[in-house]
Image (cartoon, rainbow, N blue to C red):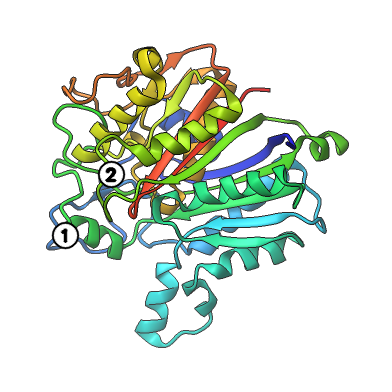
Amino acid sequence: MTDVVVTGYGVRTAFGDGADALRSGVFAGRAAFGPIERFGTAGLRTSVAACAPGPDTPPLRAALTAVADAAVAMAGLPPGRDTAVLAGAAGDFTAVTAFWASGDTSRIEDTVASGFADALAARLGARGPRTTFTTACVASASALVHGCRLIAAGVADSAVCVGGYLVEPENQAKFDSGRALARDGVLRPFSAGRSGLLLGDGVAAVVLESGTAAARRGAQVLARVPGWGTASDAHHIARPHPRARGLVRAARAALRRSGSVDYVNAHGTGTLFNDSAETAGLHELFGAAAPDVPVSSTKSTTGHLLEGAGAVEFVVTLLALLDRTVPPTAGFTGRDPDCDLDYVPNEPRSAPLRRALTVNAAFGGTNTALVLERP
């Protein structure tokens, strides 16, 4: 099977652009949550999210384009190649509201998620396959898994994988009405007293290549991707299987290709059902070794990035390997009887990381797993 490697990335969260912003926020255990200012929140139970500064929701395509440009520049990937372009996103809320508010059709293509991959491919001069995944909270992770599969199968020798979400009023209202948001405005995954998730801004892009193609052009290899997997638990439209069976199957598929890992970047939404189910699944996955594997949820600092979660957390996991630092689970106040693993509470931890697993899950029972390895 063809070796899959990472040669570039771009990332933007509420902390700002690039790796140093993540280091000063995510890896410092500093949460980005604050009152939402970009739209009215009257009538909502929770009016807190991790939003980038500014009074308005930025256009999603512009944000995706910026991180894709940064990733391609870091990789030094030339245009005109048979590069796949794979996106994980929903339609752009600002384009939808502009159309319905005034009949503005200038950005009508951005109301349909499939347009993102086409637009990015045209911008990058990429001639390979292009697909946009709309699989909710695993959308950008699905794009990454598909990129790995295309490269491993020899269908493409490179892939630009992007994904993102920017906080907007529709999803804030939906999650609020479903009582899924943290009542106290603090996202505390795996912790006693956790009461729900909080949303956040997050977009990221990753350049994947075959090891051969990267070596041929002398590209710097940041990491290998030796394993990946997807699975469905087919249990409930919104609630995970209580023992996270789909997540376990996806992770086992990834680990069959890669071997053991030193760290898990968990899905960790801060909800009662997800965190207890994910803990049970990690026990099943690692067996007696489970208490010795550090696990953290970086959503505790960035918020839940919905379609962008997989791509941003892939970049966070990459930085953990490069910096040999496990990012913490912020907001942790104490043990919950159903959550008994090593969650790296509140403070980062230095560790000789070699290989790490990042997992994501979504409504509908879809699950993804990706393993990164330091070269």
What residue lies at 67% left-to-right and 40% top-to-bottom?
8
Task: Give the quadrant of the N terminus.
Answer: top right
Nearest to N terminus: mark 2 or mark 1: 1
Type of the residue with mark 1: Ser
Is residue 371 found left or right of 46 in the rendered image? right
Image spot of residue 303 (x, y percent): 34, 43
Badge number at residue 240: 2
What residue lies at 35% left-to-right and 25% top-to-bottom?
284
Is residue 195 found left or right of 354 in the rendered image? left
Res. 369 visible in picture = yes
Name the residue tied to disc 1.
Answer: 177
Q: Is residue 124 above or below residue 322?
A: below
Quadrant position of residue 90: bottom left
Image spot of residue 372 (x, y percent): 58, 29
Is residue 112 found left or right of 294 in the rendered image? right
What residue lies at 53% left-to-right and 19% top-to-bottom?
260
Image spot of residue 71 (x, y percent): 65, 45
